[in-house]
Every structure is written in C-alpha cells, then in structure tokens.
C-alpha cells in the first residue's frame, strides 16, 4: 500500500490537496473541491481507506475544505460511512473538520455529515 499525495496547481484550482499517509494513518483533504467527474477523483481515495482499514486499527481523517460541491459532499459521506463501519468493528477513528470562523454555514454542513454518517466529527476553528 502506498501513500497518496496530490497537490493543486494553477491549472487545477478546483481539485483539493490530498495527503493520505500509510505510516502515520493520517489522511488529509484540503482546499477546494468542485471538479467535474468528482467520483472519478475520489474513488482511489475511497479505495485507499477501505484497504487501509482492512490492515490497520487506527486512522485520523482531517478535512480542511473551504468549498465543496454537492458531488464532493456525496463522496465525503461515503468515506465517513466507511470510517463509521471501521469504528464499529473496533477500529479507532478520529475525524477532524477544520473550518473558518467566518463561515457559519460550514458548521451546519458538518453537523449534517455527522448526523447522516453517524460518526463523531471534531469541529476545529482555524485561526
């Protein structure tokens, strides 16, 4: 199993940065996510989480998105549901959602994710 590291560029500002690290068990998605064919982008990340959870017992999932579209919302929900299943099987899961205090709508959205996926999400205000 390998790390996934994706960076943004001026040509792809609507793709988030991704860093899924096998050694630390830390997964991070940050930036903006409103690309076309969203599921095609997120499918390898979903697959990575499935494989990681099959052979490990702890994962930290950090979300630092400042903008996401409806398609991204569905993909994130898929990942959170996978993490909930992993947790139910005894895995240790920590989900952290970093948000800008000037964006109260994001807090509401995170609370919706938490309710729908049934997993605890730590809301962390960015400085």
Image (cartoon, grey):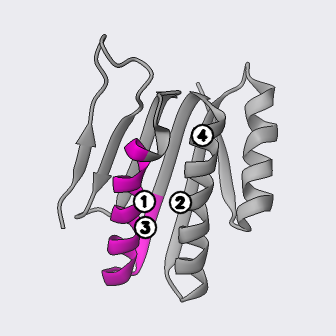
The residue wearing badge 1 is 46
The residue wearing badge 2 is 79
Q: Quadrant of residue 121?
A: bottom right
Label 3 to label 2, Cα distance in Å?
12 Å
Is there a contact, CB below 8 Å, between mark 3 and mark 1? no
Q: Secondary structure at mark 2?
A: helix
- Compared across the picture, whether 85 is left or right of 70 comes to left
Q: Secondary structure at mark 3?
A: strand
Label 2 to label 1, Cα distance in Å?
6 Å
Nearest to N terminus: mark 3 or mark 2: 3
Label 4 to label 1, Cα distance in Å?
14 Å
Crowdedness of circle 1 by 10 Å Cα count: few (<14), some, many (20+)? Answer: some
Q: Residue at x 30, y 13 (%)?
A: 11
| Viewer-closest of 92 and 4 | 4
* Front: mark 4 or 3: 4
Nearest to N terminus: mark 4 or mark 2: 4
Q: Residue at x 79, y 49 (%)?
A: 111
Nearest to N terminus: mark 2 or mark 1: 1
| Viewer-closest of 26 and 80 | 80
Q: Main secondary structure of the magenta part?
A: helix
Is there a contact, CB below 8 Å, between mark 3 and mark 2? no
The residue wearing badge 3 is 59
């Amino acid at each position: 199993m390998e790390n996934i590291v994706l960076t943004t560029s001026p040509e792809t500002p609507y793709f988030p940065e991704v860093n899924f690290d096998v050694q630390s068990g830390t997964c991070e998605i940050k930036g903006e996510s409103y690309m076309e064919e969203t599921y095609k982008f997120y499918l390898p990340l979903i697959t990575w989480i499935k494989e990681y959870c099959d052979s490990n017992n702890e994962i930290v999932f950090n979300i630092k998105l400042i903008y996401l579209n409806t398609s991204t919302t569905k993909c994130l929900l898929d990942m959170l549901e996978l993490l909930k299943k992993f947790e139910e099987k005894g895995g240790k899961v920590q989900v952290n959602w970093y948000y800008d205090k000037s964006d109260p709508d994001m807090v509401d959205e995170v609370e919706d994710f938490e309710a729908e996926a049934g997993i605890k999400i730590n809301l962390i205000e960015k400085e």
